[in-house]
Structures are given as C-alpha cells and as structure tokens.
Image (tube, rainbow, N blue to C red):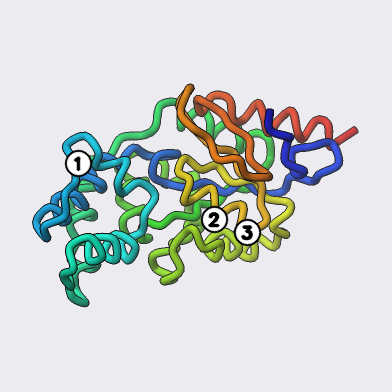
Amino acid sequence: MMAMPFVLSPEGQLKLVIFDCDGVLVDSEATCCGISAEEARAAGMTVPAGKEVETFSGMALPGIQKLIEEKTGKSLGTTWAAQTQARFVEAMQNGVEPIDGVHDMLENVVKLGLPVRVGSNSSCQEMAIKFKTTNLEHFFENRIHSARDMGLPKPRPDVYLHAAQEEGVKPENCVVLEDSNTGAKAAVNAGMACVLLRAQGEPVPDWPNLVVIHHLSEFAPLLQKALKTQEQ
C-alpha cells in the first residue's frame, strides 16, 4: 500500500492543484495517438492495431519523432512535428470529449478554494481548442502551461515547476493529477505529489509521492480530506 504523499498528509500544506490535460480533463488521446500511429506507419514503423494509445500515450511530438526515427532509421525532417501538430489541432475541432465526471470534479475542487492550473505536453493552441470544445475554458483562463511550447516535454519537470512558480507556490505544496507514467514521472521529478488516474487492475509505478484513484469522482474528496486534517 502506498504511503500518502506529504502534501496530502496532516503535516503538509496543500496550496495548488495542477492538472495534466489529455486523459485527465479531455479524452483526446485516442485521436492524437491514432494520428501519431498513422504517421509512424507511413514512415515504416510497425504499430499494431489497437496499440496506438499504448505506444504513444503521454509522449510529446519530439519524443514521438525520435521514436519513429529510431525504429525506422529514417529522418522525418525538421517540419514533421509542426505538421503533425497542425493535424492534431484540426482533429481537435471534432475529436475530443470531456473525461467522465470532469465538470463536477473541477467545480468541487474550486469550491475547496484551491487554485488550479494545467501543465501539458500539448501546445497551448491545442489546449485552447480542446477546452473550448468541452466547455472547460472558464476554469483555466490564463492558467495553461505547455511543455511543448516551452520545448521541455515531460518527463522533464519544467512545465510543472513553471506552473507552481507562476502561482507563487513551492513544489512541495502542489498536487498533480496525471494519467500517464510519463506525466507522473514529471510530477515526481518536480518534487510534487502525484495523484494517478488509473483504471482498476492496471499496473502502477512503485514511486514515492504517488497515490492512485480510479475515477475523477474520487479526486475532490481526497483533497477535501487533506485540507480538513491540515486545518486541525
């Protein structure tokens, strides 16, 4: 059984919630991973049917390009990432849905008085379309941070550290909600606690500062419990 991360314990001080985007707030991974798989297959990389998300989940475009080039021995060129991102943006107009329970979860987190931010491997352009399409933009106005735009993709911690810095909060006072191992590693590398949204029965990394939930409805009560114990 995993120990409760310090920031969620009675001795901690929870001051900021940072969300990943894809797989946590919006369900666009199947769309983006499908496009990545199409690009990979076109370059000669084998991606089995049904393994698109498993192959590319949580990866930023530079990492996807590197993987394809390593597997095929071919160069995709300097414009591949930008062209593929343009495909993502176009697909986001229609190919994205909110994660089940996300609106209720966000409303409940905001009611707790906690500030919220987003740190994602997606570009800000992609996220703006995703949040508009799913009616989430009012939660995150001017509070969106892109590891892609920074050129420092997860599992590097930079996007999460930047989000905390913008809020004026120390990393040890932050909790991150993630769904991928890549993103969870970024949170752990940032010195933050990570709540991992993971389906029942799926494997979970044995890392410190990690706690697992199976549905978004579990998240706000977890934070509420922590805040109540920290008031005492």
Report the Cα–Cα distance between label 3 and label 1. Answer: 34 Å
Taking the spot 46% from the left edge, 28% from the top edge, the residue there is 202
* Residue 186, label in figure: 2
Can residue 85 be seen at all in this image of the molecule?
no
Q: Residue at x 61, y 35 (%)?
A: 109
What amino acid is at disc 2? Ala
Q: Residue 94 got which mark?
A: 1
- Sequence-first tag of 3 and 1: 1
What SS does tag 2 mark? helix
Q: At 39% across and 44% down in the image, what residue appears?
A: 22
Q: Which residue is mark 3?
A: 190
Q: Position of residue 188 (x, y in %)?
A: 62, 52
Quadrant the N terminus occupies? top right
Marks 2/1: CA–CA distance: 29 Å
Q: Position of residue 70 (x, y in %)?
A: 26, 65
Residue 143: mark = none
Q: Quadrant of residue 14?
A: top right
What is the total number of numbered labels drawn onto the structure image? 3
For disc 1, the neighbor class at 10 Å (few under 14, some 14 to 19, many from 20) is: few
